[in-house]
Amino acid sequence: MSTPTIAAAVSPPAADPGAPALVAPRRRGLPYKVISWTVPVLLLVAWELLARAGVIAPNVLPAPSSVGTTAWRLTETGELPTHLWESLKRAAIGLAIGGSLGLVLGTLTGFSRLGEAIVDRNIQIVRAIPFLAILPLVMVWFGVGESGRYFLVALGTLFPIYLNTVLGIRQVDPKLLEMGRVVGLPKLRLVRTVILPGALPSVLLGVRLALTNAWLALVIAETVGAPAGIGFMATNAREFLQTDVIVLVIVLYALIGLTTDLFARFLERRLLAWHPNYHGGSQ
Amino acid sequence: MTTAVEAPAVRARSVTRRYGDRTVLHELDLEIRRGEFVALIGKSGCGKTTLLRTLAGLDALDGGDLTVPPSSTVVFQEHRLLPWWKVWRNVAINLPRGTARARARSALEEVGLGDHAEAWPVTLSGGEAQRVALARALVREPELLLLDEPFAALDALTRIRMHGLVRNLIARHRPAVLLVTHDVDEAILLADRVLTMREGRIAADHRVSAAARTRGDAAFVTLRAELLAELGVVEQ
Ligand SMILES: Nc1ncnc2c1ncn2[C@@H]1O[C@H](COP(=O)(O)OP(=O)(O)OP(=O)(O)O)[C@@H](O)[C@H]1O
Ligand SMILES: [Mg+2]
């Protein structure tokens, strides 16, 4: 007979909160990569062949190779780098403004009832407005200057970061907070060592969503009356029916999106090295 | 050890604690001497955790007087390690800066985890994590150590090993200990005194003789049967 326990029979041991969550193992093997890239590459080849054969008219959809040539030409003239730099700058500044506002407001709401009472309702109301609906107003307010574009990007990035910061702070394990009290952590240290790291996975998810929104906002902002930037390049090209430039810009947006996502994942892997869902928690 | 006039580490007089209109601790009296190891058993929901939380200062009193030493720590049923800190930092949490790291390391050595100092908590087994939690408590040199079913989630073999470890560590550091457990054998094998709790009070108080600490000894069997009877468990 094993040791008689009074309640073990009725209360099974609680699930270990620190146990790694169940995640499907990442498939990083060669076959998976090869297979996943096969179809896009085949499509690209087909597109090239069809365009060269004249099945697709060049002014409808130029061949990938001609888009490549255009990219090279515009890079050589310095046009592409200038516009690209302009767009990146807008995204970065807008994101910095919107992101830090979202973080600060989210922290306020997450921490204090008063903060929540003051901040949350307003944010929820503004968030309910469809993004595009305020575009005319933004143009009236800011005219054709840069600040309107910063404003749009900031607006697009504020909400995801705000919401995920609040959520992250709320989800911090109260048992860990209690442990902090048991070892006598002062309030501010408790915030720094328990609450903010606990909220970090959620905040970083917010950053990722914000990056997506930032590019979306930028596309909108640049296609209406910007004097430079890759969105301007596309609008300009439309006037002259330069389909290759338009396609190039679309491809650029996609590449930028991919790059920022990679960057966000890199951040997650660095900052969440301890987290079982991000990097197995092992060195 | 000085004489009997020495003040006890814990003194609770008529301690009362309510949740809404339900009285969980009902004018409870309790004394624990310095360096004494007391085990507390009782039916699920009888208020053991509530008592422990009150002693730890995590919950307020609704009545009565309570004296506890200034330094007390808790080891909970779950390890409660910060997953974003390496093991040694979890042990060193809120220790004075200069010596924190060295102290954490030697505490980890003591629980047999010296080579896990740089590991992430998620990579530890349940028993290892619980040992780190123990190291985190002991490194503070508490005068009162509160243990709330710290071994309940461990398998039987690991638990037996933990018993040996805890006994040695406590013999070395000599804090007053209150161990809440569901395991009657564990209570007898580890403690100097075993208390049973019922209806928000301490119902009985058994001193454990040296002989009773040997499983299979007559004294052990008798005490075990007595305790089980008090808890309303009848063994065939
Ligand atoms: N935060 C709370 N709010 C309301 N009631 C509570 C709270 N915590 C505990 N209780 C009640 O107080 C009673 C005692 O709870 P406690 O956790 O002290 O029991 P326990 O003896 O530790 O039980 P177990 O052996 O199952 O851990 C229970 O009836 C429980 O429902
Ligand atoms: Mg309990």
Image: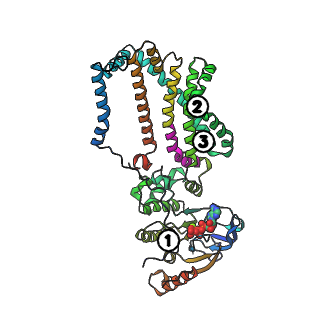
> What type is the residue that disc 1 sits on?
Ala
Q: Residue furthest right?
A: B63
Which residue was labeled with disc 3?
Answer: A107
Which residue was labeled with disc 1?
Answer: A8
Q: CA distance from mark 2 to mark 3?
A: 25 Å
In the picture shown, does residue B180 fall above or below B206? above
CB-based contact (under 8 Å), mark 2 and mark 3: no
The span picked out in magenta is A189-207
Comparing A202 with B83, the one in front is A202
> What type is the residue that disc 3 sits on?
Thr
Comparing B51 with A243, the one in front is A243
Residue B123 visible to the viewer: yes
Chain of the residue displaying label 1: A
Which residue was labeled with disc 2?
Answer: A130
Q: Quarter of the image for the N terminus of chain A: give it.
A: bottom left
Residue B177 visible to the viewer: no
Confirm or reject: label 3 Cβ below 8 Å from ligand 1.
Answer: no
**Magenta-highlighted stretch: main secondary structure?**
helix
- Earlier residue among tags 2 and 1: 1
Crowd around label 1: few <14 · some 14–19 · many ≥20 (10 Å): some
Do dots 3 and 1 share one subunit?
A: yes
Do dots 2 and 1 share one subunit?
A: yes
Confirm or reject: label 1 Cβ below 8 Å from ligand 1.
Answer: no
CB-based contact (under 8 Å), mark 2 and mark 1: no
At a point 60% along the width and 80% down the height, the residue shown is B205
Image spot of residue A181 (x, y percent): 60, 55
Comparing B158 with A226, the one in front is A226
Q: CA distance from mark 3 to mark 1?
A: 41 Å
The circle on residue B32 is none
Image spot of residue B148 (x, y percent): 55, 66
